Image (cartoon, rainbow, N blue to C red):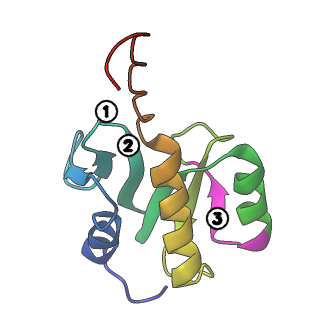
Amino acid sequence: MSGQTKQDIIDLCLTFPGAWEDYPFDENWACIRHQAGRKTFAWIYHRNGKLWINLKCDPMTADFYRSVYQSVTPGYHMNKEHWNTVELGGDVPANALEEMIGKSHALTAAPARKRPRQQMGEGG
């Protein structure tokens, strides 16, 4: 994962359906959200001279990633049970990072609306 820029990671996140880029605090904190529901699935930022991304995770998967990769820690400024922070340029391979982003995207997506049932006796 070395050599990637903040813009490279933002661009990767924007490949997911309905994703859009926002800056609710300042230019350092890129927030990648769902257009539907505006929920955030990634925070991308620089801290201590390094590039980081915060991603939502179910608790068991979050613990798994933390045990496998030194570059994955509990979420910085986030719920430590449900969010991980990944140091980019560390030991997380590109395919694993993309998988983590995909899981975060899926976990934060607005639930699909159920179609109303047809009333009995209506056409059909």
* Residue 82 visible in the current orientation: yes
Q: Is 116 on the left or on the right of 98, as rendered? A: left
Residue extending farthest to the bottom is: 3
Mark 2: give few (<14), some (14-19) or many (20+) Cα within 10 Å: many
Mark 3 sits on what residue?
A: 72
**In front: label 3 or label 1:** 1
Q: Quadrant of residue 46?
A: bottom left
Mark 1 sits on what residue?
A: 37
Element type where label 2 sits in the image: strand
Q: Amino acid type of disc 1?
A: Gly
Horizontal and vertical percent for residue 12?
Answer: 33, 72
Considering depth in this image, is 25 or 107 the residue closer to the camera? Answer: 107
Q: Amino acid type of disc 2?
A: Thr
Horizontal and vertical percent for residue 75?
Answer: 58, 48
What separation in Å lies between label 1 and label 2 (alpha carbons)?
A: 9 Å
Question: Is residue 115 positioned above or below 69 on the image?
Answer: above
Q: Quadrant of residue 27?
A: bottom left
**In front: label 1 or label 2:** 1
| Highlighted range, magenta | 68-75
Horizontal and vertical percent for residue 114?
Answer: 43, 27
Q: Amino acid type of disc 3?
A: Val
- Quarter of the C terminus within the rendering: top left
Tags 3 and 2 touching, CB below 8 Å: no
Horizontal and vertical percent for residue 32?
Answer: 31, 52
Element type where label 1 sits in the image: loop
Element type where label 3 sits in the image: strand
Mark 2 sits on what residue?
A: 40
Question: Is residue 89 positioned above or below 16 on the image?
Answer: below
